[in-house]
């Protein structure tokens, strides 16, 4: 919890119970939940927290680069507290989002893009769409 508090303080965010709970949840998960998923997960332990509070908090965390917002082609965004550059793998069957470490070739690509017309790359997001191993097996068996 100490790391969570320190990160919020570094970004000059007020340490509210809701903000701490939301950031802690995102920091400790790899599921890339939607705002509704965060709300549902925390509603039992924080019954007074509204969905609007979750949305406002996610927006605040996004603005100070403590979370990234992912548009993976669904009707709502997903959120990830891991803000270092990494690749996201998205299963088109079950909609799960998986993290993959950045590959050295992507760092080289980023450098090359930066030199094109002196373009200043501020951030990047890389998504690969396909089927996870579980869904691939179901597809092979004709279950999907």
Image (spheres, rainbow, N blue to C red):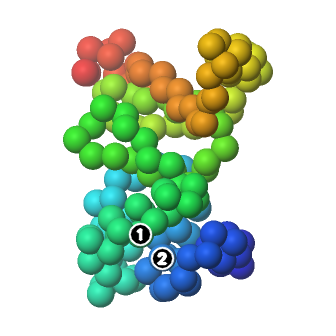
Label 1's element?
helix
Q: Is residue 79 left or right of residue 85?
A: left
Q: What x and y, as percent, mark residue 41?
A: 37, 67
Q: What x and y, as percent, mark residue 98?
A: 52, 36
Tell which of 137 and 43 is nearer to you.
43
Tell which of 62 and 138 is nearer to you.
62
Task: Point out the image quarter for the N terminus.
Answer: bottom right
Say above or below: 73 vs 131.
Answer: below
Q: Residue at left 48%, top 57%?
A: 62
Label 2's element?
helix
Neighbour tally class for label 2: few under 14, some 14-19, many 20 plus, Cα within 10 Å:
many
Q: Residue at left 40%, top 28%?
A: 91
Residue at the far front in the pictured view:
117
Determine which quarter of the picture holds residue 96. Answer: top left
Tell which of 115 and 129 is nearer to you.
115
Determine which quarter of the picture holds residue 66. Answer: bottom right
Neighbour tally class for label 1: few under 14, some 14-19, many 20 plus, Cα within 10 Å:
some
What residue sits right under mark 1 in the picture?
A: 57
Q: What x and y, as percent, mark residue 140?
A: 36, 12
Q: Residue at left 33%, top 65%?
A: 55
User: Would you say the residues marked 1 and 2 are in contact, meaning their CB atoms lie under 8 Å apart?
Assistant: yes
On the question of residue 109 being in view, the answer is: no
What residue sits right under mark 2 in the picture?
A: 19
On the question of residue 108 being in view, the answer is: yes
Q: Earlier in the sequence, mark 1 or mark 2?
A: 2
Query: Label 1 to label 2, Cα distance in Å?
Result: 6 Å
Say above or below: 80 vs 7.
Answer: above
Q: Residue at left 37%, top 38%?
A: 71
Task: Point out the image quarter for the C terminus.
Answer: top left
């Amino acid at each position: 919890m100490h790391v969570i508090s320190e990160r919020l303080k570094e970004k000059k965010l007020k340490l509210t119970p809701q903000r701490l709970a939301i950031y802690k949840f995102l920091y400790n998960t790899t599921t890339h939940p939607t705002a509704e998923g965060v709300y549902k997960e925390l509603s039992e332990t924080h019954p007074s927290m509204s969905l609007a509070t979750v949305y406002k908090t996610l927006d605040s965390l996004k603005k100070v680069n403590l979370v990234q917002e992912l548009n993976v082609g669904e009707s709502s965004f997903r959120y990830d507290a891991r803000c270092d550059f990494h690749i996201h793998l998205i299963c088109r069957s079950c909609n799960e989002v998986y993290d993959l470490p950045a590959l050295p070739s992507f760092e080289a690509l980023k450098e090359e893009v930066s030199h094109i017309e002196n373009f200043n790359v501020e951030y990047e997001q890389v998504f690969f769409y396909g089927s996870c191993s579980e869904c691939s097996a179901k597809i092979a068996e004709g279950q999907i």
